Image: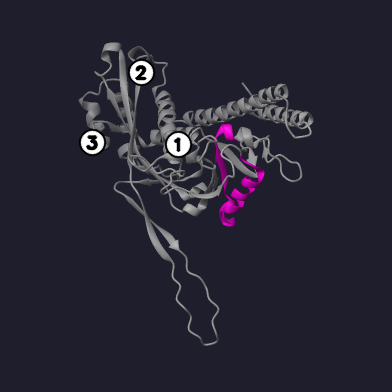
Amino acid sequence: MINILELREKRAKLWDSAKAFLDSRRNEHGLLSAEDTAVYETMEADVLSLGKEIDRLERQAGLDLELAKPTTTAITNRPAQTQEPEKTGRASRDYQAAFWKAMKSKANFEVQNALQVGTDSEGGYLVPDEFERTLIQALEEQNIFRQFARVITTASGDRKIPVVASKGSASWVDEEGAIPESDDVFGQVVIGAYKLATMIKISEELLNDSVFNLEQYIAREFGRRIGAKEEEAFFVGNGTGKPTGILHSTGGAAVGLTAASSTVITMDELLDLYHSLKAPYRNSAVFITNDATVKAIRKLKDGSGQYLWQPSVRLGEPDTLLNRPIRTSVYVPEIAAGAKVVAFGDFSYYWIADRQGRSFQRLNELYAATGQVGFKATQRVDGKLILSEAIKVLQMKA
């Protein structure tokens, strides 16, 4: 098995070699020849590829660990030890057994009766509680936004979240003088629930294979498909039929800095972006940008000659930029005129509202002609930035 720590060490050595090559081949104007540029970009591409492989292996290890957990707990009878109360509804063993029986074969009357407590309005079945936790874990592995945002669960209807629109202040007053009133002004942010769905097709032969792990396959596919769409919306969603993303002009993060160029980011601009965020938010702040933007940032140095971007060599720790974690997403725009290319802030102020109860429906007839069975998976989710000043973005010159 590939050792993740060894890959991290290999990547760090490759990066050191790339930096040394870059420093040694610059001419008096600080530029590289076309030949040296090609060599450096090859070295940089190797660093980037290793980084992606490390991320993939870490996500895979996390998901494998979650799916390897036992689905039931052994019953033990010990003196002076009370038994756990019998679980009911979607948490019960009977519901879990009936759910997977309905997914693997056509549900008979007995199975349908057992699933009545979890039937949704569209004919599907709400997933068992334990499997829902597995699905959430799969989403977290696929969607980096869920790793930093605050996730809440709602039962139904809109969720109204009170936020401070403006804060009160203290005043200097004379002895026995009147103290002026200065109250906080509160506003509200309303989080709803938008429907997100996907269709998963599986051949009947594979479904009937006793070795095939349907639960693991569905969790992986659900996480890959739904997670990707979620992440896209949390970054660039316009709030119409989908969540409002942090990069959207209305309801998104505030612009901390506009770059002087439409094609280049400088060290000073990254420092200005860093300091545009108020100090309390920097303690938990993270940089998120595109892979292509990281490629440009890697070449930047601070005043003492140290590179701003530093690769991680420890398992579980991210790469850093200005000593803060940096992550990448394909849904953050690449460098272009007017594009918002770097987000920096405390992403826990972005709230993700999961409507309780994801559902699956087996479709027996839709793909019968091709010998396949369809599975329709749906969830309802919304996301909004609760406090715009908690995240700042760097926007390129238009």
Q: Amino acid at mark 3?
A: Ser
* Residue at image location 44% in from the left, 39% down from the top: 236
Image: magenta residue range: 265-293
Q: Amino acid at mark 2?
A: Ile
Residue 270 painted magenta: yes
Q: Quadrant of residue 228?
A: top left
| Disc 1 secondary structure class | helix
Residue 287 can be seen in this image = yes
Tag 3 or tag 2, which sits nearer the N-term?
A: 3
How was this image coloured? one colour
Question: Residue 202, which numbered label?
Answer: 2
Around disc 1, counting alpha carbons within 10 Å, would you say few (fewer than 14), some (14 to 19), or many (20 or more)?
A: many
| Disc 2 secondary structure class | strand
Residue 330 painted magenta: no
**Between 287 and 152, the one nearer to me in the picture:** 287
Tag 2 or tag 1, which sits nearer the N-term?
A: 2
Q: Quadrant of residue 82?
A: top left
The residue furthest left is: 109
Q: Which residue is mark 1?
A: 231
* Residue at image location 29% in from the left, 24% down from the top: 362
From the top left corner, tell me how far across and down residue 115 is, in percent: 26, 32
| Disc 3 secondary structure class | loop
From the top left corner, tell me how far across and down residue 157 is, in percent: 29, 48
Q: Amino acid at mark 1?
A: Glu
Check if mark 2's residue and mark 3's residue have beta carbons within 8 Å: no
Q: CA distance from mark 1 to mark 3?
A: 27 Å
* Residue at image location 70% in from the left, 23% down from the top: 34
From the top left corner, tell me how far across and down residue 267 is, in percent: 66, 43
Residue 75 can be seen in this image = no
Task: Relative to 334, say whether 209 is above or below.
Answer: above
Q: Which residue is mark 3?
A: 121
Q: CA distance from mark 1 to mark 2?
A: 25 Å
